[in-house]
Amino acid sequence: MAMTSTLSPCTKTLPLHPTPILSLNLKTSPSIQLKSNHHRRRTTLIISKSKNTDSADGPDRLISAVCYFYPFFDGIQYGKYVINQFSFLQTLIQPLVPAIRVFKSFPFNGFLVFLTLYFVVVRNPNFSRYVRFNTMQAIVLDVLLIFPDLLERGFNPRDGIGLDLLMSLDSTVFLFLLVSLIYGSSSCFLGQVPRLPIVAEAADRQVM
């Protein structure tokens, strides 16, 4: 009877050791899982924010700058009066003459370039918003050339005050295209966002 009484406390205390170990594991494992999930969520947010940035790298700047040559080449004929009056404009445009001749060599080149820029670049989410916005600005600027073209076809004076008004209109359109080309391309090369009057608002509505 004495031996059984001394052994009985030992048999009762032995099962108590595994339970704290199991409970410790059950308490610590959820906390580790929560920390890892929180870390994954934070990493996902950082990655998604970096994809939505409008920062422009070298290729984006180059593509955006080249797009502004499209409306200038398409409206070069509006400078036929002002270019002959100022020699510095002739010197400025002389390096672009070969490219202008290639652009004007086929009558549908302007329309093909328009379709390419709109559907391949503007509507392509693989390009950054920086590229798509500047491309859309160049497209809208080229579309606006329809109005002076229609005015020239309906109002084509040979001399007098009507010819003077036509020369002033053509020269104004050409100078606006030239300023847009210089401002737009130089801003893109510097990584800035050029915003042309009227054109920028229309481009914003088209680019999501």
Image (cartoon, helix red, strand yellow):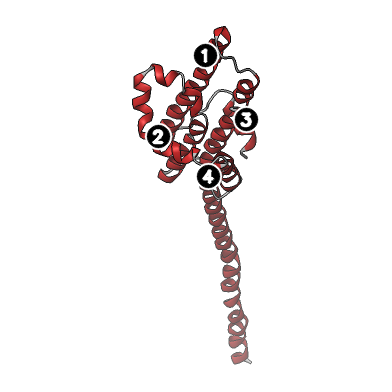
Could you tell me which secondary element the residue under label 2 belongs to? Answer: helix
Residue type at mark 2 is: Val
Give the number of the mark in front: 3 or 1: 1
Q: In the image, 168: left or right of 30?
A: left
Q: Residue tagged by mark 2? A: 97
Task: Depth check: give the residue in front, 44 or 143.
Answer: 143
Give the number of the mark in front: 2 or 3: 2
Give the number of the mark in front: 4 or 3: 3
**Label located before the other in sequence (1 or 4):** 4
Give the number of the mark in front: 1 or 4: 1
Q: Residue at x 50, y 27 (%)?
A: 77
**Label located before the other in sequence (4 or 3):** 4
Could you tell me which secondary element the residue under label 1 belongs to? Answer: helix
- Extreme top residue here? 161
Q: CA distance from mark 4 to mark 3?
A: 18 Å
Could you tell me which secondary element the residue under label 4 belongs to? Answer: loop
Q: In the image, 75: left or right of 150?
A: left
CB atoms at circles 3 and 1 under 8 Å apart?
no
Residue type at mark 1 is: Ser
Q: Residue at x 55, y 53 (%)?
A: 44
> Mark 3, residues whose alpha carbon is within 10 Å: few (<14), some, or many (≥20)?
some
Give the number of the mark in front: 2 or 4: 2
**Label located before the other in sequence (2 or 4):** 2
Q: Residue tagged by mark 3? A: 202
